[in-house]
Image: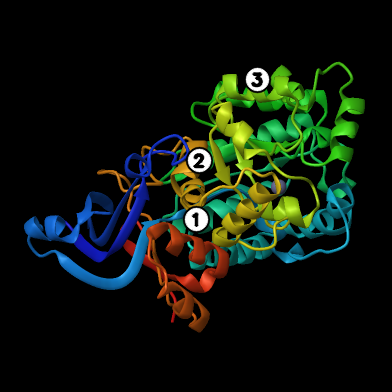
Amino acid sequence: MSNAVVWKASVLHFLEDPDSASVNDACEYFEDGALLVVDGHVLMCGAAKDVMKDLPPGCEVQDLTGRLIVPGFIDTHVHYPQLEVLAGCGVQLLDWLNQYTFPAERRFSDRDYADEVAGFFLDQSLSHGTTTSLVFGTVSPTSVDAFFTAAQARNLRMIAGKVMMDRNAPDYLLDTAESSYDDCKALIHRWHGKDRLAYAVTPRFAPTSTPQQLEVAGRLLQEHEGLYLHTHLSENPKEIEWVSELFPDSKNYLDVYDQYGLLGPRSVFAHSIHLCDHSWERMGASGSSIAFCPGSNLFLGSGLFNLGKARRCGIPTGLGSDVGGGTDLCLLNSMKSAYQVSQLREETISPLQAFYLATLGGARALHLSDRIGSFRRGNEADFIVLNPEATPMLRFRTEKTKTLEELLGVLMVIGDDRVIESTVIMGQEAFRRD
Ligand SMILES: [Zn+2]
């Protein structure tokens, strides 16, 4: 017998980018709505009066009137081993890596420690409403085995990879072009395509890989179907200068990756803040995606991402928390930071646009919109239940809102992880706030 549950609440999801379509075409919002889930997949999303008319026999009813259901948030760039360097103050990117990040990543060759942090990271992600992430491990394959084991146990759709890094970092964190090839291959065989997991070839960034290692990354992508490429690009002016010294024959930073065949529809470049016109065009033509990490960009003082330009170039863009350069796992906070960045750029985004970026936008950036990110019939039922009255301040403010847009604005500006009342994975409750 099938397992059917109908969730009654306000329901919102996106069908299109609200920037390129009218509000009515971009999203579906049912104030008295219902989401019918059968065997872990969405069967129907609509007005309660329509959905409740024809329920499967034995269907369980979850009445969550007063709550708002949206698809689970999608974090398109995050480092799970960096939880312990959250809030590392006082420096910008290159010093931050040396001072905080590299020493912390050393411990992840210890399986017990990696297991503990991977489990904690995923449970925290769920409690923050994030149901899918594109994740950096460390250079140690153990860190990735631990991560995938923990994700598989929770039945999560997750993408991760081992860092490839064979120069310009402490000795204890270096691999070689050859060892990274062997380690990645073994991880790909163990994990890629298993249950809801996928592998990302993950050179940290151009400065910490030799040309030989970038060549290996390109070879891995060619040898296996459906792999991702996940790396950093043009985050900080000093980093960019360093890249031009290390790769004098490349036209620009993106071109370094391009030369090794690392661009394409499953390639995700975190940050991409300081790009020349040629890079923007090339990025768009290649079908590559960008992870916009506004919280991290503000915290590390990296710069203001040009979201409008990314849109105009047709580049799929999602939000990334970039913990630990970012300050928390909460994508509501990333939406607020995205809004602030857009204000400073005088290209203000709407709350609808912010929620799109955290859901369908992220799914598109990860090439997964046929499975997650919206409540299209047949999609995997990963979703979250938001409580607009989670705190006295939220209750005070949200009871005065009159439109959906206003409510979403309040949730992203005043809300935080306390708004996430529960998180549902493939139709099963995976987190509930007490
Ligand atoms: Zn990062």
Residue 297 appears in the figure: yes
Kindly identify the amino acid type of the residue bearing the numbered disc 3. Answer: Arg
When the figure is inspected, residue 166 is found, relative to residue 411, above or below; the finding is above
Asked if disc 2 is less than 8 Å from ligand 1, the answer is no
2 or 1: tag closer to the N-terminus: 1
Q: Quadrant of residue 179?
A: top right
Above/below status of 419 relative to 257:
below
Residue furthest to the right? 245
At horizontal 23% and vertical 72% (from top left) the residue drawn is: 63
Q: Nearer the viewer, mark 3 or mark 2?
A: 3
| Towards the viewer: 115 or 412 | 412
Q: Which amino acid is tagged 2?
A: Ala
Q: Which class describes the residues within 10 Å of circle 1: few (<14), some (14-19), or many (20+)?
A: many
Q: Which residue position holds label 1? A: 151
| Residue pointed to by mark 3 | 282
> Is label 2 in a helix, a strand or a loop?
strand
Q: Foreground: 136 or 88?
A: 88
Residue 68 vs 192, above or below: the answer is below
Identify residue for label 2: 198
The amino acid at mark 1 is: Ala
Label 1 to label 3, Cα distance in Å? 34 Å
**Residue in view at x 76 percent, y 57 percent:** 299
Report whether 337 appears left or right of 236.
left
Foreground of the two, 243 or 199: 243
Residue 100, given in percent of the width and then of the height, sits at 83, 59
